[in-house]
Amino acid sequence: KLPIEIGRWFNIPRENRICKLCTCNEIGDEFHYLFKCTDVYISNSRVRCLPKYFITNPNVVKFEKLFNVTNINQLTNICKLLDTIFERVSSLG
């Protein structure tokens, strides 16, 4: 239900698949929601669930590292963040 995917289904140009939860005016893709979206629920969950390393100066390398963690506690926290993102994006309809 991310704008990047929904837009693809309806042939919306990529640059118009913007996040509707915040005012960053960025494409609503996985990277945006995990690291940059300023929606209060997502950003609070991000701070609670991700180590500071991932939040500070996010980049593609950190994105890849995040999805390759093996620590069960870190994986659980990532799932909690993803659940928050899913709930917020789904609330838009």
Image: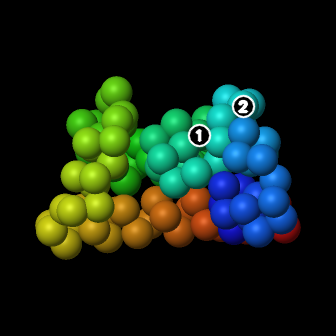
Judge the density around disc 1: few (<14), some (14-19), many (≥20) Cα neighbours within 10 Å.
many
Q: Amino acid at mark 1?
A: Cys
Residue at screen point 33% across, 48% down: 63
Q: Is residue 45 left or right of residue 13?
A: left
Residue 18, quarter of the rendered image: top right
Q: Position of residue 50 (x, y in %)?
A: 33, 49
Judge the density around disc 2: few (<14), some (14-19), many (≥20) Cα neighbours within 10 Å.
some
Q: Give whichever of discs 2 and 1 has the lower sequence position.
A: 2
Residue at screen point 65% across, 42% down: 27
In depth, the one of 12 and 32 nearer the eye is 12
Q: Secondary structure at mark 2?
A: loop
Q: CA distance from mark 2 to mark 1?
A: 10 Å
Q: Secondary structure at mark 1?
A: loop
Q: Amino acid at mark 2?
A: Asn
For mark 1, what is the residue?
Answer: 37
Q: Position of residue 80 (x, y in %)?
A: 44, 66
Q: Which of the numbered marks, if any, corresponds to residue 11?
A: none
Which image quarter holds the C terminus? Answer: bottom right
Could one spot residue 46 in this view of the protein?
yes
Q: Is residue 72 above or below residue 14?
A: below
Residue at screen point 46% across, 60% down: 81
Q: Is residue 55 left or right of residue 91?
A: left
Could one spot residue 21 in this view of the protein?
no
In depth, the one of 66 and 43 nearer the eye is 66
Q: Contact, CB < 8 Å: mark 2 with mark 1?
A: no
Residue at screen point 56% across, 62% down: 84
For mark 2, what is the residue?
Answer: 25
